[in-house]
Amino acid sequence: MRTHVVGIDIGGTKLATVVADSTGHILSKVRKPTLAEKGPEYALQLLFEMVRETVASADLVQESVSAIGVSCGGPLDTKTGVVYSPPNLPGWDALPLKAQLESEFHIPVTIENDANASALAEYRFGGGRGYNALLYMTMSTGIGGGIVIDGHIYRGANDSAGEVGHQILLPDGPPCGCGKRGCLEALCSGPAIARRAQDAIQKQLTDRKAAATRLLNLANNRIENVKSEHVLQAARTGDILALQLVEETAYYMGWGIANLVNILNPDIVLLGTIAIAAGDLLLDPIRKTVSEFAMPRTAEAVKIAPAQLGEALGDLAAIALVV
Ligand SMILES: [Zn+2]
């Protein structure tokens, strides 16, 4: 009886394989470093071994597994299952990941980009349960997103929907990794918050104000070490500069979310990573900006909350594709 599923989470630094039952309950897990510099052939062979190891450690045989779900950084084509050079996986150029896994294990394989898979996992197992239209946004090294409507991922014409981080808010703003300027990601990702903090500290030092001391102390008095975590930490102790940086972050995030909420009219927006760590310190001013910028009816309908799956998100993202 094929009663179980395998999930594969492929990241630039870690590979994880899990086995779950038909309700998404995880029975076993194996995690190994990706060693991305060794290229895709090494990672694939490692994944084949990891899948077998995970199935065995759940006391199952390979014949118990009905399907494999794969959550991987994009760009990728969900129909053909080909991965096209994700930035964190050098050498994965037009890699037929689905075909390779299917020819190894002889069961159906579903491949999805990690942000979409995460959105589906939150919809099935996390903060999106019971809602119809969900928008999920990561807030970490980048700002990615996934849209789930009535239980289905909205992928668009060629799997490129949900690029919520590359809406342009300030056309003359800071450069973004995508080559444009002033994208939401260039203002509110972890590195973008750090860069705004560093610029603000530098300006205060140049103006000979002492207000940056607290933030700078947390980073061992080195401007280049200031990270988004330090901004949150200093804001919690009432540091004025850090609080201004949090306000500014919430303003841009709220602006970006208001744009999306007006278009999609979701009943829930779930925010990951930095928003989870920050909690209401960041979420309350985001909610305020959304209610100011979005149309009254869309603003009224939407709940803005932290994503709920935390550390389990990657595993459940892969599993959500096949249960
Ligand atoms: Zn961009």
Image (tube, grey):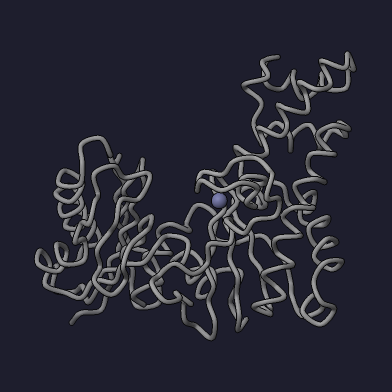
At x 50%, y 52%, the residue is: 311
Residue toward you, 2 or 134: 134
Compared across the picture, whether 152 is left or right of 165 comes to left
Residue 24, located in which quarter of the rendered image? bottom left
Q: Residue at x 33, y 75 (%)?
A: 322
The residue at the point 50 percent across, 75 percent down is: 124
Whether 250 is drawn above or below 173: the answer is below
The image quadrant that residue 232 belongs to is top right
Where is residue 247? Give x, y as percent.
82, 46
Q: Is residue 214 above or below residue 55?
A: above
Image coordinates of residue 301 in percent, x first then y, are 77, 80
Q: How many marks?
A: 0
Where residue 262 appears, as percent x and y from the top left, is 72, 75
Q: Quadrant of residue 76?
A: bottom left
Which quarter of the image is occupied by the C terminus?
bottom left
Observer-nearest residue: 25 or 293?
293
Judge from the rendering whether residue 316 lies leftward or rightward of residue 50; answer left or right: right
For residue 78, side relative to residue 104 (left or right)? right
Q: Is residue 88 above or below residue 156?
A: above
Quadrant placement of the N terminus: bottom left
Name of the residue lying farthest toward the front: 172
Q: Nearer the viewer, residue 112 or 30?
A: 112
Q: Is residue 66 left or right of residue 259?
A: left
Residue at left offset 51%, top offset 46%: 179
Q: Position of residue 160 (x, y in %)?
A: 44, 67
